[in-house]
Image (cartoon, rainbow, N blue to C red):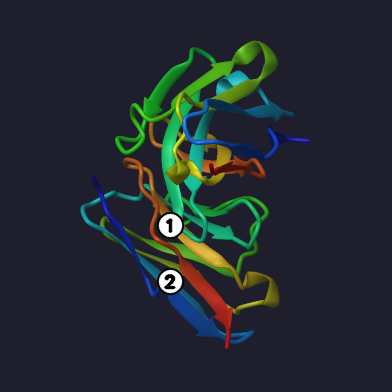
């Protein structure tokens, strides 16, 4: 089955670090881009950035550049989204999604999401 | 940044209705537009890409049209499973529309 499986929900304190994961299976993981999308509680979708696991080429939305780090380990078909110092405003659902296209991507396969809660 | 404006924000409709959602871009995006459906507690699902191409497995009652700055998603005959929130996404750069919630009238 073609799928993206995301890591489980996290509860963290402000200032803590976090790395969440997204594992692809059922397709050639190194042949498609993987994007990350944020959805804050009750709000819309925001495109954070995208990585090509084949060579780790990474692009960030200007709104998220410097705020998060996207990485991938192609040996285990897994992409990551990480924060070095969380803020309460990082509380959101985070989706990974497979990007289709050539440097212009829409998302044809989505993970179920990882809920991140940041609270003191 | 290219801004995407969806209208309406909320739409009340009945089963069997023809429903149209509009997405306007602040500048031309050619046909680099996708539409997604999201149900509560679920991940978004791709419906339409390249403005008018139907994703495999998506019912044919969904259709998309437009180019440049104005786009529409049409549901020809609304079904009970279609009550959800719909988002457009321009992929000339990075943005989604703010969403349109389709509610039961």
Comes first in the chain, label 2 or label 1: 2
Q: Tell which of A39 and B92 is nearer to you.
A: A39
Q: Tell which of B46 and B38 is nearer to you.
A: B38
Q: Is residue B75 visible?
A: no
Q: Secondary structure at mark 1?
A: strand
* Label 1 chain ID: B
Q: Is residue A3 above or below residue A44?
A: above
Q: Is residue A60 above or below residue B74?
A: above
The residue shown at (60%, 14%) is: A73
Q: Position of residue A69 (x, y in %)?
A: 45, 24
* Label 2 chain ID: B
Circles 2 and 1: CB atoms closer than 8 Å: yes
Q: Position of residue B12 (x, y in %)?
A: 52, 84
Which residue is labeled 1 in the image?
A: B88
Residue found at the far front of this picture: A120
Q: Is residue B95 visible?
A: yes
The residue shown at (56%, 79%) is: B103
Which residue is labeled 2 in the image?
A: B21
Quadrant of the snapshot with the N terminus of chain A: top right
Label 1 neighbourhood size at 10 Å, few (<14), some (14-19), many (20+)? many
Label 2 neighbourhood size at 10 Å, few (<14), some (14-19), many (20+)? many
Residue found at the far right of this picture: A1
């Amino acid at each position: 089955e073609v799928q993206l499986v995301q890591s489980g929900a996290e509860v963290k304190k402000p200032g803590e670090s976090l790395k969440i994961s997204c594992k692809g299976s059922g397709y050639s993981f190194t042949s498609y881009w993987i994007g990350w999308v944020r959805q804050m509680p009750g709000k819309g979708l925001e495109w954070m950035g995208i990585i090509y696991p084949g060579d780790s080429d990474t692009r960030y939305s200007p709104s998220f550049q410097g705020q998060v780090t996207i990485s991938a380990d192609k040996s285990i078909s897994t992409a990551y989204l990480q924060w070095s110092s969380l803020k309460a405003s990082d509380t959101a659902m985070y989706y990974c999604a497979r990007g289709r296209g050539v440097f212009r991507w829409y998302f044809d396969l989505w993970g179920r999401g990882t809920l991140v809660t940041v609270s003191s | 940044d290219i801004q995407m404006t969806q209208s309406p924000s909320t739409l009340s409709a009945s089963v069997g209705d023809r429903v149209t959602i509009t997405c306007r871009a602040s500048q031309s995006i050619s046909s680099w537009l996708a539409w997604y459906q999201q149900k509560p507690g679920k991940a978004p699902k791709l419906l339409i890409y390249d403005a008018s191409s139907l994703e495999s497995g998506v019912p044919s009652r969904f259709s998309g049209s437009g180019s440049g700055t104005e786009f529409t998603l049409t549901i020809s005959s609304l079904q009970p499973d279609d009550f959800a929130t719909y988002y457009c996404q321009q992929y000339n750069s990075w943005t989604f529309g703010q969403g349109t919630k389709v509610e039961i009238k």
